[in-house]
Amino acid sequence: MDAVRGHWGRFGLLCGIWLWVSAAQPSTPAPTGQSQEVPRLQFRLAGYPRKHNEGRIEVFYNQEWGTICDDDFTLANAHVLCHHLGFVAATGWTHSAKYGKGVGRIWLDNVNCGGSEKSLVDCRSRGWGNSDCSHEEDAGVICKDERIPGFVDSNVIETEQNQVEEVRLRSIVASHAKRPLPVTEGVVEVRHKSGWAQICDENWDSRNSHVICGMLGFPAEKKVNRNFYKLYAERQQLNYRLHSVACTGNEVHISMCSFEFYKGNATTAACKGGMPAVVSCVPGAPFAISRAQKKKRQQRQQGQQRVRLKGGARPGEGRVEVLKGGEWGTVCDDRWNLVTASVVCRELGFGSAKEALTGARMGQGMGQIHMNEVQCLGPEKSLWSCPYKNITQQDCKHSEDAGVRCNIPYMGYEMTIRLSGGHSHVEGRVEVALGARSNDSPHQWGLICGDGWGTLEATVACRQLGLGFANHGLQETWYWDGSNVTEMVLSGVKCAGHEMTLTNCQHHSAVTCQKTGTRFAAGVICSETASDLLLHAPLVQETAYIEDRPLHMLYCAAEENCLSSSARNANWPYGHRRLLRFSSQIHNNGRADFRPKAGRHSWVWHECHGHYHSMDIFTHYDLLTPNGTKVAEGHKASFCLEDTECEEDVGKRYECANFGEQGITVGCWDLYRHDIDCQWIDITDVKAGNYILQVVINPRHEVAESDFTNNAMKCNCKYDGHRIWVHSCHIGDALSDEANRRFEQYPGQLNNQIV
């Protein structure tokens, strides 16, 4: 079997090497022992609650404040950073954003100091701006409360907490308070010490409101009835913290605007002639409050959508893809920043950007890279309105695909779902609370019937929990019953995979479950990363041909049901079957290896072909009429999932020889050549005409992926009864009529082969 598997050309370089940090040239490794110009770095402690000698560590580099990821962080790293801040040593360090999540760039990741370095630039790391973290992983340090003698404090330690990190809208209108989330209007409040404080609205304008709404996950703002809130302010004892806020409207966070703090404990008297700043925000289509509003906005967006996000585990994050010339492609990360990322986020109905992701952090795309060096100013309504450069072959590779993480409104989705009994917080039996319509209502928790529960349903559950992708959807669970919840409250749950919550999925109106007991309740195992399989469409078009294969050579194929049903009535071993053959090259462009759901102990040995099947159905091959009617079909078991070839600097992990582990590594591809058994569709009974060739990978969604919408490929075919022309192969939706018209005019340019 392995002998017939092919090895095809290499793809672009996948950037994943470790770099020595050079502050002068952040993208180039700096050799040790050589003099170089190092810019002066600034450091500060931030976050709350904390003392003056502890906090989230932030570094000012390239004219922008950013954080450090906690991956591989050590006490030695903390020693070097505390020295930078003027303390004699570190007594500890913190992980998982103990002092709150920062904003902006994550400048460093996998920092590795020995402890005696004079500067952070002498420590090893992945390089400036090269990180695979989120701000939930911001590192902090705890320094010994003893200053270095003679230390000149040029690095401001925020002892007065003169930063604005957390903002909220406090609704004071009774009708607003009873509305479902999100909160779209209210008094703007900033976190201060153990409570919240207001902002004086003197000289407040729509540009300030635009920034606040963006932070809270809303793409736009609208006018508010200021007089109503003025009556409220006159009756309240207020605690003002900020005044003279002056934003340009293009900032992604209020901390980037000009403003001033009140000194001490400011009261209502501090804002003479003013009142608390009030903002009213407009939710984007994914979070629109009324169904009519949501439907109207979604229709408007779908009609003109030229930008989308792919590969993200949570709403509002993903690889940025743009539509050009009828083909979706990616954006190169050169000069990619928060301002440009925010234009993308607002265009898609989210708020401003939390992070501008570089280095294919959301997985690599395929096809064209349509844009490079995009430079938005901030007010643009679409990414396409921003100046950009076209791509030349030398400019970018998909290892440089840009991505975003956007601010989204707080919806409280995680309040009505939980996991119980698991070995960790990312797995367990799924429990849901139904009928709880407000925070005052007691939650009555129940189980979900495991009948029909699969990967798509588990994907929605993990998204609702905020735990990323689904690794497995479990129909039977053997978890410890620690919550004493035993009643089934949902059954027949069927999700498309894109829903925000399980209640948005189809389900039975009355609970019907064939098997009772907590053992048969649905469960999930969630993961931060997932695989993403894509078929290399041009190869199908290049290799497709027809073969008339003698029946005496098809016994093994018949045994594995790779022929159409009429083959059973053939005059074996005489005669032949007409086969449409082609090669399949399947890439894993995700962020996790693609592994069979079943372990090796349950793989099935097929004596005739002499190999194990790790998945009964790995691909579906169908020939359809233009209206979608199936006229011929084939299927392909996973004869052997392995790394046929990989991108440069990516090592092979999976090989089928000697009953080896099966799978496809990130950055590798598996090749099924056109000349192996079952790599075909039996078209013996198909009449001449125009058809669609459809190939679907992982059709039953047995293995979790970050994106199932790119698992299908369709090609247009013209079959004259003897020869076949395959053209316009395309990942995703059905092909356009324009492609068919072009084919009718120039059929001779397309493949025309018969064996």
Image: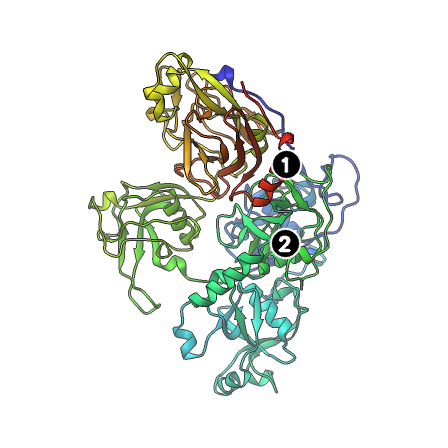
CA separation in Å, label 2 and label 1: 22 Å
| Element class at badge 1 | loop
Type of the residue with mark 2: Gly
Disc 2: which residue? 66
Percent across and percent down for residue 257 are 66, 67
- Horizontal and vertical percent position of residue 20: 68, 37
Above or below: residue 268 compared with residue 12: below
Q: Which residue is nearer to you in this view: 171 or 241?
A: 171
694 to the left or right of 368: left
Residue 8 position in % (x across, y down): 59, 24
Residue 605: tell me if it is visible: no
Horizontal arrangement in the rendering, residue 70 relative to residue 152 (left or right):
left
Q: Earlier in the sequence, mark 2 or mark 1?
A: 1
Residue ID for mark 1: 15
Looking at the rendered structure, the kind of residue marked 1 is Cys
Disc number lying in front (2 or 1):
1
Which of 138 and 398 lies nearest the eye of the viewer? 398
The local secondary structure at tag 2 comes to strand
Q: Where is residue 493 shown, x and y percent of the image?
A: 32, 50
Examine the image and state in which quarter residue 502 appears: bottom left
